[in-house]
């Protein structure tokens, strides 16, 4: 099941994010000492954004956070966070969650989606490529740690 995350689930979301990010940050997750539950609670409660989750057996198995970034055209959405619990990789969770994001973006009138992916996260890059994401020629990465990707929400 895919649904909107509830503020009370911020701690579970933070734990899932940390488990997922730990797989591609070999030297430790950046900002590991940050108050991630509070940050997620803010993201969940933002009136201009949305956080979706995948749930299996009453447990969060995937999360996706998105909104129109400040200064971007209204028809653009940015996928800020997209994580699947490593215990549920290759089980269709990411594909279902991504499909739900696309459905929501289309309903919201979005035409283009953008994201940054960690350059060392080859698993995520392959997943995004299977979903139709491509390198963003208009926005080259500003550092060596991330790649900018773009997706036509309308399929054009």
Image (cartoon, rainbow, N blue to C red):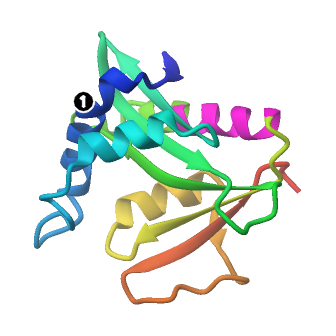
Total marks in image: 1
Figure check: 55 above or below 129: above
Q: Nearer the viewer, residue 18 or 128?
A: 18
Query: Which residues are drawn in magenta?
Result: 97-107
Count neighbours of disc 1 (C-alpha within 10 A) and say few if under 14, some if 14 to 19, many if 20 or more.
Answer: some
Q: Residue at x 69, y 39 (%)?
A: 102
Q: Residue at x 19, y 46 (%)?
A: 19
Outermost residue, top direction? 57
Magenta highlight on residue 17:
no
The image shows residue 56 at horizontal and vertical percentages of: 35, 16
Side of 46 relative to 89 (left or right): right
Outermost residue, right direction? 156
Question: Would you identify the image quadrant in which residue 74 lies?
Answer: bottom right
Q: Nearer the viewer, residue 58 or 15?
A: 15
Q: What secondary structure is the magenta-colored segment mainly?
A: helix
Q: Quadrant of the C terminus?
A: bottom right
Tell me, yes or no, if residue 49 can be seen here. Answer: yes
Q: Residue at x 32, y 74 (%)?
A: 120
The image shows residue 136 at horizontal and vertical percentages of: 67, 76
The image shows residue 140 at horizontal and vertical percentages of: 60, 86
Side of 79 relative to 124 (left or right): right
Question: Would you identify the image quadrant in which residue 90 lies?
Answer: top left
The image shows residue 58 at horizontal and vertical percentages of: 30, 10
Which element is circle 1 on?
Answer: helix
Question: Would you identify the image quadrant in which residue 13 lies?
Answer: top left
Q: Which residue is mark 1?
A: 12
Figure check: 114 above or below 12: below
Q: Nearer the viewer, residue 70 or 120?
A: 70
Figure check: 116 above or below 36: below
Tell me, yes or no, if residue 86 can be seen here. Answer: no
């Amino acid at each position: 099941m895919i649904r909107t995350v509830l503020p009370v689930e911020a701690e579970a979301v933070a734990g899932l994010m940390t488990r997922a990010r730990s797989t591609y940050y070999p030297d430790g997750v950046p900002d590991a000492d940050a108050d991630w539950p509070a940050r997620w609670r803010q993201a969940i409660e933002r009136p201009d954004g949305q956080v979706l989750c995948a749930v299996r057996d009453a447990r969060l198995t995937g999360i996706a956070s998105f909104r129109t970034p400040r200064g971007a055209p209204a028809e653009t959405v940015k996928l800020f966070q997209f994580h699947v619990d490593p215990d549920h990789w290759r089980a269709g969770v990411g594909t279902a969650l991504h499909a739900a994001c696309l459905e929501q973006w289309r309903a919201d009138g979005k035409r283009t989606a953008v994201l940054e992916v960690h350059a060392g996260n080859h698993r995520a890059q392959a997943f995004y490529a299977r979903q139709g994401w491509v390198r963003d020629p208009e926005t080259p990465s500003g550092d060596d740690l991330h790649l900018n990707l773009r997706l036509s929400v309308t399929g054009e």
